[in-house]
Image (spheres, rainbow, N blue to C red):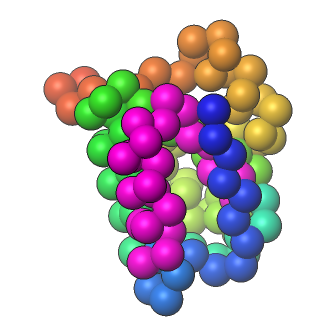
Amino acid sequence: MTIFALTGAIDLHYVPTLRSLFQSRLHERCPALIVDLSGVDFIDSTGLATLIEYHRDAGAHGGIFCLAGINPNLKAIFDVVQFEKVLAIFLTVTEAKAAIKSGRVRPYLADEPAAS
């Protein structure tokens, strides 16, 4: 299980770095990745797309992906785009780890209908 603790803004300028980090996890077939967003104060559409892309790509090899530490600014954005229907989101990294270990978080499957 890998944890990435991000800080600052996830925007057009940071996304290439984030994609590179995610690609390294994909090449290593990381079994589970938790992204701690408690230090992130802003995310734009390129950042949102990058999170979704990793979720999809990790699922192709059975990898699990979830988010933790969503602050009120990000929660407002995630609520608008209904991220909770696509990604597992937890209040803390500890909760995310427990959910993964107990099997409550599953890999993304392309033919799975979206949660409602």
Q: Residue furthest left?
A: 111
Count of number-bearing discs: 0
- At horizontal 76% and vertical 51% (from top left) the residue drawn is 69
Q: Residue 91 colored magenta?
A: no
- At horizontal 54% and vertical 33% (from top left) the residue drawn is 32
- At horizontal 69% and vertical 38% (from top left) the residue drawn is 90
Q: Report the quarter where the C terminus lies.
A: top left
Q: Position of residue 45 (x, y in %)?
A: 41, 74
Q: Is residue 6 above or below residue 85?
A: below
Q: Position of residue 21 (x, y in %)?
A: 50, 62
Of 17 and 53, the residue lying toward us? 17
Of 64 and 26, the residue lying toward us? 26
User: For residue 78, which quarter of the picture?
Assistant: bottom right
Range of magenta residues: 16-37
Q: Position of residue 47 (x, y in %)?
A: 47, 70
- At horizontal 69% and vertical 65% (from top left) the residue drawn is 6
Q: Is residue 89 visible?
A: no
Q: Is residue 48 above or below residue 87?
A: below
Q: Residue 34 colored magenta?
A: yes
Q: Report the quarter where the N terminus lies.
A: top right
Q: Is residue 84 visible?
A: yes
Residue 33 relative to residue 107: left or right: right
Q: Residue furthest top?
A: 102
Q: Position of residue 93 (x, y in %)?
A: 77, 39
Residue 7 relative to residue 55: left or right: right
